[in-house]
Amino acid sequence: MALTKAEMAERLFDEVGLNKREAKEFVDAFFDVLRDALEQGRQVKLSGFGNFDLRRKNQRPGRNPKTGEEIPISARTVVTFRPGQKLKERVEAYAGSGQ
C-alpha cells in the first residue's frame, strides 16, 4: 500500500499537532521545494533518508514491441534516488521482522 500526500498530512495533523490546512500546506510546500531544486539541476540531500540526483541518459537504440522495428530512444535526464544508510538499515530491519 502506497503512502499518499494526504496520509502524510494526516500524520502531521495527528502527531505534530498542525491543523489539517497547515499540514496539507506543509506537505505541498515540502514537495514544491524538492521539485524546484531538481528542476534547477540541484542535488537534494535529506540527512538520514537519502539523496535525489539528476542523471543524464544518452540516446540508445530501442525496439517497438509490436512491430519489432528498431527506433531510437531519446537522450533525457532522469531523477534517481539513493537511500541513506539509516533508511537502508530501517528497511532491512523491517523486512527481516517478517511484517
Image (cartoon, helix red, strand yellow):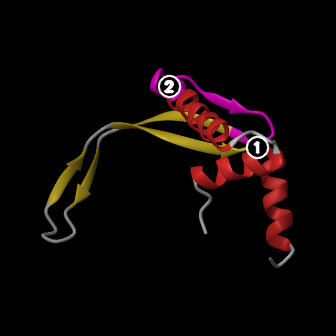
What is the number of the mark on residue 36? 2
Tell me if 36 is positioned left or right of 94 in this view.
Answer: left
Tell me if 50 is positioned left or right of 21 in this view.
Answer: right
Q: Quadrant of residue 94?
A: bottom right
What is the number of the mark on residue 9? none
* Start-end of magenta stretch: 36-50
Q: Residue at x 30, y 41 (%)?
A: 59
Q: Residue at x 84, y 55 (%)?
A: 89
For badge 1, the amino acid type reads Gly
Tag 2 secondary structure: helix
Q: Quadrant of residue 16?
A: top right
Mark closest to the chain's N terminus, 2 or 1: 2
Tag 1 secondary structure: loop
Q: Quadrant of residue 68?
A: bottom left
Q: Is residue 46 magenta?
A: yes
Q: Which residue is mark 1?
A: 84
The N terminus - image quarter: bottom right
For badge 2, the amino acid type reads Asp
Q: Is residue 55 magenta?
A: no
Q: Residue at x 82, y 48 (%)?
A: 15
Task: Give percent across and percent down for residue 71.
Answer: 17, 53
| 76 vs 72, nearest the viewer | 76
The C terminus - image quarter: bottom right
| 52 vs 2, nearest the viewer | 2
Task: Give percent across and percent down for residue 22.
Answer: 66, 35
